[in-house]
Amino acid sequence: MLSDLHMHSFNSDGSATYLELIKRAKQLNLDAVALTDHDTFMGVNDFLNECRVNNLKAISGIELSTYKDCEIHILGYNIDPNSKTPIAKELNNLETARTQRMQLILQKLREFKIDITIDEILNTFKTHSVSRSHIAVLMAQKGYVKSKQQAFELYLEPHKPAFVDFYHFDPFSAIEIIRQSGGVPVLAHPGRLKLDKIDFENLIKKAVNVGLMGIETYYPAHSKNIISLCKKLANKYNLINTNGSDTHNIDDELITDFKPSKRQYKLWGCKMRGKLKFILIIFLTVLAVNASTCHIYKALAEITNTDPKITLSYQGKSAVFYPEKYKIKSKVFTHLYEGQKFNRSAKFSEKVKTLKLIKSQGWTSEQAFGFMFSGLNKDIERWLILNVSTAPKNAKVVFRPQNDIKFAIIKEKDGQQADIKTLYDDIFEQLMFSDTPKVKVSTLPIKAEITTDYCRQETFLRSRFSTGFSSSSAARKHNIRLAFKKLDGLVVPHGEIMSFNKAVGPRSAYNGFVEAKIIMGGRYEEGIGGGVCQASTTVYNAALLADMEILAANHHSLRVSYIEPSFDAMVNGSWSDLKFRNNTGRDIYIHSYCTDSSRAVVEIYGLQMPYRITRQYKILSRIAHSGSEKILDYEGKYSKYVKYKGQTHIVQQPKDGMISEGFLRYYKGETLLKEVKIRDDRYAPQKGLIVEGTLAPPLTPEEDEIIDNKANENDDKLFDLDRILKGFENILQ
């Protein structure tokens, strides 16, 4: 019998799909195979089913990565991948640890300007689990390194800059877990451990004591001496010999020669130099004539009891369950047998008789199974959930705010579930005359909870509110439009909280915002994101009119011109946010946009309101301002407005402060239902600011002419003095 009991697919660190592995196995005329992906059963069910279709014997398998002084791999065979076995919890831990490890590796690579993401790997390789091999291949494909090997040598190997150690559990625990899960533990590729004979046998002894059942004796990299030693220890400790190619890439490992490195190395006392060539096809053929491996598959298959069995099938999918694996826990049978002794070791035929007796007492088939085979019904139903049941898809509203028709509805789709009652009745009836019942699963529909008609009720306009910004600077207009672009199309599910800061993101240059006027320290200054508060204020007022539950809204320190007092909503990135909860019972949809006439508009859609809401404010008192302050523009901050002494520019007009209140009024038609006070606010008075230039003013034309005339007069005087001095010179001569 030709077999390969050690193969890897893309579900771990292989490159082939399980279909490609099966196709290659058929080309090589293999009789039996096993899929043994690292630390996962993903794809095993599909692999086994496809092998049945192709008349290829197959065993469920897995390869666990463990560590004890060095990395040790343990193969596990004949484990039911659908059962809630002890190994399932450990695999979840390993998967979590692997994901965290890969994320840390990618983070380290980004420090070297190597930009690769988890999603990119998953999409590229169509895999479900990311490994270092996937990262290395993608690094080569994107040109960061020349080859996969170079990626490992430079970055991914131990002691290299992007290496991250991995989560392990020890091999002895792995062996125990495999045995507890009903499987067959086998030591994988022992030749790679590089242990001497004594250490290797000590490892085997300890492993056998906790349940080791086999050694992967026949492996492409094993020398004749290693194979001989493995066979000797297998015979000594009553272990089975297994074989496997450990293929990760069908092109590289099933077609090309196996070529170890040229370096000299010592393995179990045997010195090996130069190239070793193992053509895998020949290697597998040798196994066919080796007496100890002719029945490897059979030995593995017979370790666990396979008869009787229950086979379930549904639309090309099937699963086999072995009732004998499940022990009876209930003492009810002693009463039903009328004193006849019944114990856990009862034959299956006796259990079936008891099942019939229980059924005759008026129990349902499902109840009888629950008592007779504790856990069997749970495993059956778990398989049904994964392979038969489909969850209904509720109708869904698709919000398209930029379209003329803003709402589209995706119709609901009913799901299905297995007809449990009929299933157990069929199993029961067949068990009366057969130990191997085969049952086709029938289904029942599951109606979607949310229908198209229900969704149509959601698409009403609840509120619309707008503010104007036509007189704003170009920078401020940009910020308002950008904030609204980020908000547009936002869906807030019922019960969820809308956060303005979260929806819009940081007000930073990186996020696209620019400098414009903001209120800082009781005065207007230039700052990143100026104008965003008008966007938040517009959203706030629309939320009020839509009757949202306001959780956070803060007023500015000064009055703003674009909204009435007590209806502004100041936001910043650090401590002030606008938050409200959707308490309407349905999802709400936000459409935010700016018109060509510079109006900021917010529309909120959802369940139709039974009333309408208006806003009202009251000014309780005013706080007088203290005039204006004049400052000299020594820094040239206002140089485009003022330059010389005497030139002034009004930066900020003085304004009175106030104390105000905000109210909402609820109407049914024209009837006022209630008035609710929502705000008490105090706005500080605004001190005026006048700036004056600091340079000396230029001369007027008249002043310039006077200065020129004076200069001419002085020139004349100098001329007369010169003439007098010359006269004195003549006299002296």
Image (cartoon, rainbow, N blue to C red):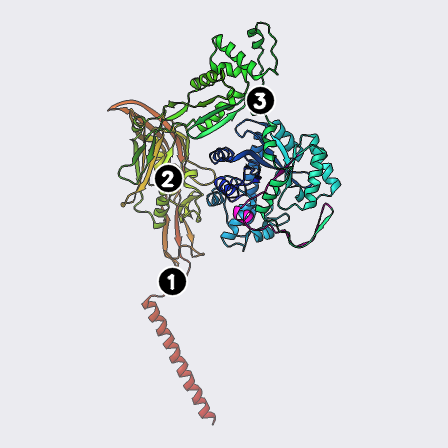
Q: Secondary structure at mark 2?
A: helix
Give, as a three-letter code, the residue at label 1: Pro
Q: Disc 2 vs disc 1: which is toward the camera?
A: 2
Span highlighted in magenta in the image: 240-268
Mark 1 crowdedness (10 Å alpha carbons): few <14, some 14-19, many ≥20: few
The secondary element bearing badge 1 is classed as: loop
Report the residue at 33% width, 41% height from top. 561
Residue 661, quarter of picture = top left
Tag on residue 487? 2
Rendering coords of residue 602 (x, y %): 32, 37
The image shows residue 367 at horizontal and vertical percentages of 49, 14
Q: Which is more foreground, mark 1 or mark 3? A: 3
Residue type beneath disc 3: Lys
Nearer to the camera, 608 or 78: 78
Q: Earlier in the sequence, mark 3 or mark 2?
A: 3
Quadrant of the rendering where the N terminus is positioned: top right
In the picture of the structure, the residue carrying the numbered disc 1 is 697
Residue 292 spot, x, y in % from top left: 65, 37
Q: Residue furthest top?
A: 338
Residue flagged by tag 2: what amino acid is it? Leu
Count residues near mark 3 (Cα–Cα under 10 Å), then give few for <14, some for 14-19, many for 20+. some
Work out how far the residue at label 3 is from the one at label 2, CA to CA, in angstroms: 58 Å
Q: Which mark is residue 325?
A: 3
